[in-house]
Amino acid sequence: MMGEQERGPGEVVWSEEGVPLAPAYQDVYYSRSGPGQGDLVFVEGSDLPARLASGEAITIVETGLGLGINLLASLRALVAAGRGSMRHASVELHPLTPAVMHEVHARLGRMDAETTAFLSVYPELLARGSASLRIGAHTVPLQLVVGDGAAALRQLDLRADAVFLDGFAPALNPALWSPEVFRELARLARPGASIATYTAAGGVRRGLKAAGFDVERCVGFGLKRHRLAGTRRPGGA
């Protein structure tokens, strides 16, 4: 995901405590406190359960598909709500191969209906850049742009209702946390759209504010004291 790195398939190694790592970035694919980060930081941080339960149609744009942890958490929220609809678009410089993606989720041991549905369409998503995921009564359009940061986001044409700002840590992957990325996310986000991220780094807060987002620090997940959540300001930056 770093601007200095060339596009190529992602690689996964496992830490002694059983957490998947990306050796190229020396960072984890999700919090060392567990994949529940997707539920608290992104699903709850975007108020998805209540919004879906009200029947809202939600388009999500995400920086960094990774293992699909946040996508899966959103799918579970959709199924639990029993109402509403969802579309998910993401960018990723180093997508995992279908074989590695399946191996990782099998090792994580949560092969539920949502994970199975995602794994079944992931090869098509990777090959074509789009796929339709069917889960229960829901059909969820998926889009994936393979590319780096702002350049990949420029290929998207949508109006996002929720922004998931993810990816490896800002200090390790600065290209995905740049002013250019924040401006592209602001372009894609409708006024009032939610934004959520696991980091509360000062540079990220300032960059999002300059791009047109109002964010505040919230209680973090696991070992992280704080995270950010907020909305896209009406009327631009």
Image (cartoon, grey):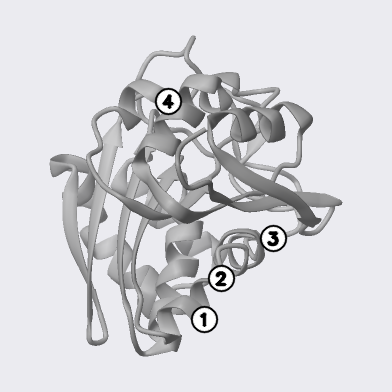
Q: Nearer the viewer, mark 2 or mark 4?
A: 2
Residue for point 35% across, 20% down: 7
Q: Position of residue 75 (x, y in %)?
A: 40, 72
Q: Position of residue 161 (x, y in %)?
A: 40, 58
C-alpha distance separating marks 2 and 4: 25 Å
Image vertical order of residue 125 relative to residue 237, above or below: below
Q: Which residue is label 2 attached to? A: 47
Q: Which residue is label 4 attached to? A: 149
Q: In the rendered structure, which disc, 3 or 4, sits on the residue that comes first in sequence? A: 3
Q: Position of residue 167 (x, y in %)?
A: 55, 38
SS at circle 1 = helix
156 vs 169, nearest the viewer:
156
Specify the amino acid type for callout 1: Ala
Q: In this rendering, would 127 be left or right of 203?
A: left
Q: Residues within 10 Å of mark 2 (few under 14, many from 20)?
A: some
Specify the amino acid type for callout 2: Asp
Q: In the rendered structure, which disc, 1 or 4, sits on the residue that comes first in sequence? A: 1
Q: Which residue is label 3 attached to? A: 34
Given contact means CB atoms under 8 Å apart, are the residues at marks 2 and 1 in contact? yes
